[in-house]
Amino acid sequence: MAIDLSIVIVSWNVADLLGRCLESILAGPIQIVTPGARPAAGDDRLAVEILVVENASSDHSREMLEGYPDVQVLALAENAGFSRGNNIGLRQARGRHLMLLNPDTEVLDDALPILVSYLDAHPDVGLVGPHTLNADGSTQSTRRQFPTLMTAFFESTWLQRFAPPGLLRRYYMSDYPDDGTFDAGWLQGSALMARREVYDQIGGLDERFVMFSEEMDWCRRAHDAGWRVVYVGSARITHYGGKSTDQVVARRHIYFQQSKIRYFRKHHGSAAAETLRLYLLAQYGIQLALEWLKGVVRHKPQLRRERVAAYREVLRSGLKPED
């Protein structure tokens, strides 16, 4: 009997959230397969193994994980980052299907069986993702079309509110029902399930994406290989969001924009990527000047100092993706 699903969780300094995530998985209608073991014969529940890649946390994560003997812990000596950490877990995974799950999530009800069943029933679908909720129960936007260069000029910049009508609505797939099931370009990596055949064909995450856009690239590679990517709204999780990256504000800006530029260089060419890089640097230069002026007039001075320091670090980086 095969393991149906391997869940890979990369965790860094979020011990309490990780514990809640594990409890939510264990509370579901599943059979947990312990490290090195096989699913129990005669148990028709979904057979799941959990692999936690512990990314050299400095909190009590490792001590907390000692209370979960059914979980395979891959303890790293240094922080490997999100993409590399997931690949370490994927290489150890034994399941028919593979799931990337953030530690700041909670799996609700029968989300895992729903996603696995959808993959099993649709052999042309390579990746699926659930309806994701914020902590307050509202819907978190997790489905996207692939971005154009015009989309990148506005999305997640301070000019976003001035985007042409319909541009970002199409990108965010806002006209689709949150509880529906439909094809998307790519899905957020906080909860993303792939069939093993996809992993065997295209490989894991591109580790040059330290964090951000790695799931967009993964879905793009799967799409280019002929696989469908589907949002399954009947499966639900809660995602608290950004608890690891909140710890490194300036680097978060840098990684986010470098990854966006890297994606465009990889899939749209060097000219598009360089145009985007120069545009984003100009945006950060304008933001830095505005924050400095607000600081001069003593409007929330501590906040202004923090933002000026962060934007200055972004500009010093040049937003050049490292090879």
Image (cartoon, helix red, strand yellow):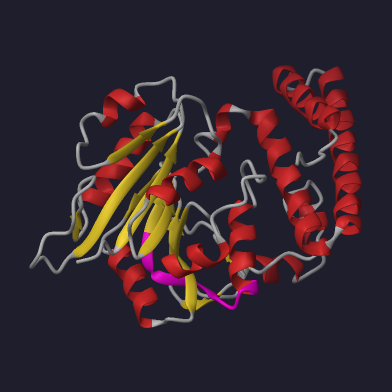
The residue located at (40%, 59%) in the rendering is 98
Pick whichever, 192 or 284, lies toward us.
192
Task: Indicate whether 260 appears above or below 177.
Answer: above
Is residue 144 one of those drawn in magenta? no
Q: What is the magenta segment's predominant secondary structure?
A: strand
Q: Is residue 91 visible?
A: yes
The residue located at (91%, 45%) in the rendering is 278
- Residue 35 found in image quarter: top left
The residue located at (77%, 54%) in the rendering is 160
The residue located at (34%, 65%) in the rendering is 96
Report whether 86 appears left or right of 173. left
Q: Is residue 136 visible?
A: no
Task: Indicate whether 134 appears above or below 252.
Answer: below
Is residue 230 one of those drawn in magenta? yes
Q: Position of residue 146 (x, y in %)?
A: 69, 67
- Residue 72 found in image quarter: top left
Task: Indicate whether 92 appears above or below 164.
Answer: above
Residue range in magenta is 224-236
- Residue 290 found in image quarter: top right
Report whether 176 appears left or right of 45. right
Q: Position of residue 58 (x, y in %)?
A: 44, 20
Question: Can you say which quadrant of the picture contains the C terminus?
Answer: top right
Q: Position of residue 282 (x, y in %)?
A: 91, 41
Q: Position of residue 129 (x, y in %)?
A: 46, 64
